[in-house]
Amino acid sequence: MISFKALPIKYNNIDTLSVTEHYVIKAINVKGKDILLSLPNIFLLKETAHSINTSRRYANVIAAFYAYLSTTEKFQAITVGEYHAIADNRDIRRWQVSRQIKRVARQSERPTSKTIFEEARIILSFFTWIAKFGQITNINVQTKTWIAHFKTKKMLSYIQQEAKVSVDSNNIKVLDKASRQKKNKSLITDKEIEALLKSYVDPVYSALFLLSLGTGMRPAELVKFPYIGTGNNKDILPYSEINKDKGTVVFQVTGKGKKIRDVVVNLKDLCDIYELYTKKFYQERRKLYALIHKEDCPPSVLFLNKNGKPVTPQMISRVTNDAKKKAKKIYPDFREKITFYEARHWWPTMFAIEFFKDKLLTESAEALYTAFAQALTEQLGHEDIETTYKHYIDMARLVYAAQSGSVHELLTNPTKSVLEKLKEMQPPLKEL
């Protein structure tokens, strides 16, 4: 078996004249040498450089698939640089089956059947790109022979047998059910939001967190929100100068998968961000930026840290991990699972509650309501309308039905901002 590793890389890209950051895959100790895999690494550059987290995930999945191929008899005489040309749909299916066999043998809830399938889809997208890139591959992306149907009795019996576990051990269905039951569908609560907002040492992260709560944008999209917009974003200005007649402003952003969409932003939330961060800190940080870069900070950059550096998704993640420790001291019930990304799920849940109100608890919300679903998916940048719809309807029902201590206390009145509702909370959390 050959070892494959996914490693981060950062360099000045001569094509884009900017710093590029993504993951690469290296085959370790192949006849005494380490080999960079050309096609997988070009794919990671072309398709995942927009998000380091996406790049990490895709690289790890492809590396795992290549490691599996190296263990099979079919690939023993094949060089790693030719794996893409020899692999076929059956190899992807067998990889999924082998993962389930190992999982059942360990009696582990992870990886779930859903994760195994989704990661097989990543492999399929990689081979789809290879075909478009003009390279030879045996993968037929038009047929579904790559899918392993784990729910069939024959497949369940085969995996149970190959895993060599006792007769009364849990099978795939039981393990998947246990995993689903452990997933808590409750959202970040009002007090968790307040505790995290108070725990950021640098207010720029509190401002970003508020913007995520109010829009559902991903961290990689939030950091692109400008001080002064241009082109389709020309209506975006500092709150003191923005046109307040409409009550909202539209931010056109290039999101995941390089897809462009319009995100609606509440001006009341922008007012809070202006008061919290922009008015007090932005101009001074622009000066620090100019000292570092020997040029003025471009108006496309709004969020700068205390050192005058543009905030990145990686910085948000790192600083949030530190803030969580302080939040736990302020509010002992602050949950470990809470991350910055939890804010993205808050907006669509509140949107569902405000849209349906008491109808959430009736069957009328079950049917796909097109207008709501379209607005929801456009704001979030999702493609799967039905899955997104059902997920947030279920989430909103749980929150709406709750009687105390949940997010439903925060924003059932769209005339108020996130921060205004937080300020109404009684009693407030203690300061450290």
Image (cartoon, rainbow, N blue to C red):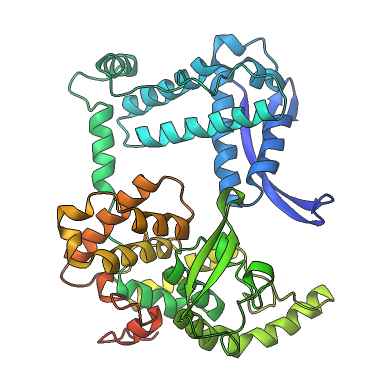
In the visual, does 29 lie left or right of 121?
Answer: right
> At 30% across and 76% down in the image, what residue appears?
410
**Residue 120 appears in the rendering:** yes
In the visual, does 294 lie left or right of 237?
Answer: right
In the rendered view, tell whether residue 176 sits above or below residue 190.
above
Task: Tell which of 126 and 355 is nearer to you.
Answer: 355
Rendered location of residue 13, percent (x, y): 80, 51
> At 22% across and 50% down in the image, what residue appears?
366
Rendered location of residue 294, percent (x, y): 84, 76
Task: Tell which of 216 and 94 is nearer to you.
Answer: 216
Assign the N terminus to one quadrant of the image. top right
Rendered location of residue 245, percent (x, y): 49, 85
Quarter of the rendering containing residue 234:
bottom right
Rendered location of residue 418, percent (x, y): 38, 78
In the rendered view, tell whether residue 272 sits above or below residue 121.
below
Quarter of the rendering containing residue 406:
bottom left
Quarter of the rendering containing residue 139:
top right
In the rendered view, tell whether residue 393 sits above or below residue 272.
above
In the visual, does 105 lie left or right of 224?
Answer: left
Q: How many marks?
A: 0
Task: Tell which of 66 and 280 is nearer to you.
Answer: 280
In the visual, does 250 lie left or right of 194?
Answer: right
In the rendered view, tell whether residue 139 sits above or below residue 299.
above
